[in-house]
Image: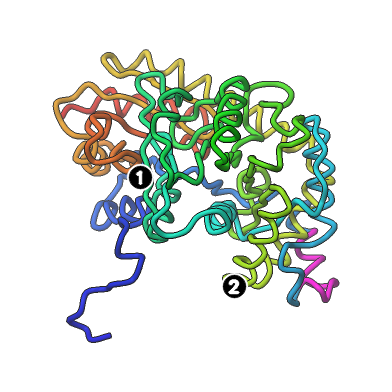
Amino acid sequence: MAASQPPRGGTAATFAPPVMQARRWLDGVSFLADRPLLNVSQAAPMDPPPEALRQAIADAALNDPGAHLYGPVLGLPELRAEIAAEWSRAYGGDIRAERVAITQGCNQAFCAAIASIAAAGDEVILPTPWYFNHKMWLDMAGMRAVPLATGTNLLPEVQRAGALITPRTRAIVLVTPNNPTGLEYPAELVADFLALCRRHGLALILDETYRDFDSRDGAPHRLFADPDWGDTLIHLYSFSKAYRLTGHRVGALIAGEPVVTEVEKFLDTVAICPNQLGQRAALWGLRHLGAWKADERAEILARRDALSRNMSALPGWELMGAGAFFAWLRHPFDIGSDPLARRLVAEAGVLLLPGGMFLPETDPGARDQLRIAFANIDRPGLQALFGRLAAFRP
């Protein structure tokens, strides 16, 4: 390609990665030692996995020759079986190992799911605010992301979604607990969406990346208890958040066998097999880190509660949603959320993401809404964050 020619590939159809874009706002900005940057732009855990898990990874690297070879395209049989058994217990359903596929993170699980059920020119309904990587993949694949506005309560409505369905619609996507709002979708709402999708012959893609940090006890929904779940449901999951395995890229997809058959084609083409060390780490975590993961959940929920209490320091601001790793706020200033977010870097030492990175350009929320990812900031840090936001004057 000549240097003067603009790119013409599918990637040109979408926007720049929002987190990378926001990080560039840090270029040339200095932060005082007594007021370091508070980075609440990304939810990925910044701490390494617990030492026992790191040791298990090291042992596998040194002593398991298979950890360095190609493996099955759909993942380690032991990991697929462990997921099937644990998810069956957790959700009160019947999930078999052949319905589980291991992927290179949950983003790849989403891409594989979409590739298995839709093609260029098709439509997929995304509630807004949406997870931006979902929108980006649909753009790159030549599909139309149909925004499902959620209003002030941020919950998608089944009736409104039904009105958006056309002959080109192939799926509805739900993320719960939600990224970016943090909201936990009620079990009844999720069940209603499954029923809607089933009536129209669509897939319900349910991304539960943050399910380990749901505040509700027990199963957050009963979809897997439906013996026919596989005709409609595609479930996505990530091990990155639960065991701090972000760099190892391990996710999972659970679906009916016809979908998994198509997913295997996609995975063989783009990755050949999932990360072998990461899969072994995920399997070890499932078998040994239940109590540790429960403690992590308790800490995240405590931070969520601390964040809610600290909202009193921000007169005029509104906490629209909070849960898992995220909070979604409305600010009171006569300034757009994008310029506000940029100014907060230099003037308050805070890096967060503006609502426009998660919304269509025409959505009014793009002007006055913001996302905070609080997983990597402790309770004293949250107090400092809200102090800086309270002191900011545009």
Q: Nearer the viewer, residue 20 or 381?
A: 20
Identify the magenta region: 56-67
Q: What x and y, as percent, mark residue 68?
A: 75, 76
Q: What x and y, as percent, mark residue 323?
A: 52, 27
Residue 33 image label: 1
- Residue visible at 36% across and 38% down in the picture: 147
- Residue visible at 83% across and 60% down in the picture: 77
Q: Main secondary structure of the magenta part?
A: helix
Q: Is residue 64 magenta?
A: yes
Where disc 2 sits, the SS reads: helix
Q: Is residue 140 magenta?
A: no
Is 136 on the left-hand or right-hand side of 108?
left
Where disc 1 sits, the SS reads: loop
Residue 65 image label: none
Is 225 on the left-hand or right-hand side of 108?
right
Give the position of the N terminus as an image quadrant: bottom left
